[in-house]
């Protein structure tokens, strides 16, 4: 299901690791997370999960939960192939991204 979604992309000088943001359009933490990525020069792709159909949204959350073995909250961010971040705690993001 996830590979069929229409993600928006944000250009940035840092393209490694590949970053995907699952966000809510009304979420302040999601907006801060995306601003953090842009301020630090990261390219990323994102989707506002609240703007896709309910069945699709539920399937995406199920896939993420099964793959990463964690509860899904927003923002939910995949970093490379195996890392992920839940929510926006700047110190965690800096540590994961090596800043």
Image: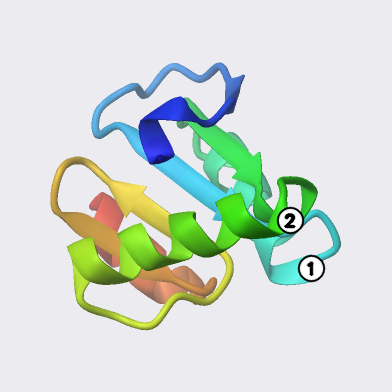
> What residue is at 46 percent from the left and 31 percent from the top?
42
Residue 99 visible to the viewer: no
Q: Is residue 54 above or below residue 56?
A: below
Q: Position of residue 83 (x, y in %)?
A: 20, 57
User: Which image quarter is the N terminus in?
Assistant: top left
The residues bearing labels 1 and 2 have C-alpha atoms spaced at a distance of 5 Å
> What residue is at 66 percent from the left and 53 percent from the top?
49
> What residue is at 24 percent from the left and 34 percent from the top?
17
Q: Position of residue 60 (x, y in %)?
A: 46, 55
Mark 1: few, some, or many residues within 10 Å (few <14, many ≥20)?
A: few
Q: Judge left or right: residue 97 versus residue 90.
A: left
Colour setup of the view: rainbow
Q: Mark 1 and 2 residues: CB-CB less than 8 Å, in contact?
A: yes
**Element at badge 1?**
helix
Which numbered circle lies on residue 63? none
**Element at badge 2?**
helix
Residue 1 visible to the viewer: yes
Q: Is residue 4 above or below residue 92?
A: above
Which numbered circle lies on residue 31? 2
Q: Is residue 28 above or below residue 49?
A: below
Identify which residue, 24 or 14, lies in the foreground.
Answer: 24
Which residue position is annotated with label 1?
28
Quarter-wise, where is residue 84 in the image?
bottom left
Quarter-wise, where is residue 71 in the image?
bottom left
């Amino acid at each position: 299901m996830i590979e069929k979604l229409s993600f928006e992309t944000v250009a940035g000088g840092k393209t490694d690791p590949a970053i995907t943001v699952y966000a809510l359009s009304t979420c302040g933490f999601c907006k801060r997370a995306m601003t953090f990525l842009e301020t630090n020069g990261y390219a990323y792709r994102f989707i506002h999960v609240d703007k896709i159909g309910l069945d699709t949204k539920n399937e995406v959350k199920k896939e993420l939960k099964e793959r990463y073995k964690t509860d899904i909250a927003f923002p939910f961010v995949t970093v490379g192939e195996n890392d992920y971040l839940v929510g926006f705690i700047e110190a965690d993001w800096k540590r994961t991204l090596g800043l």
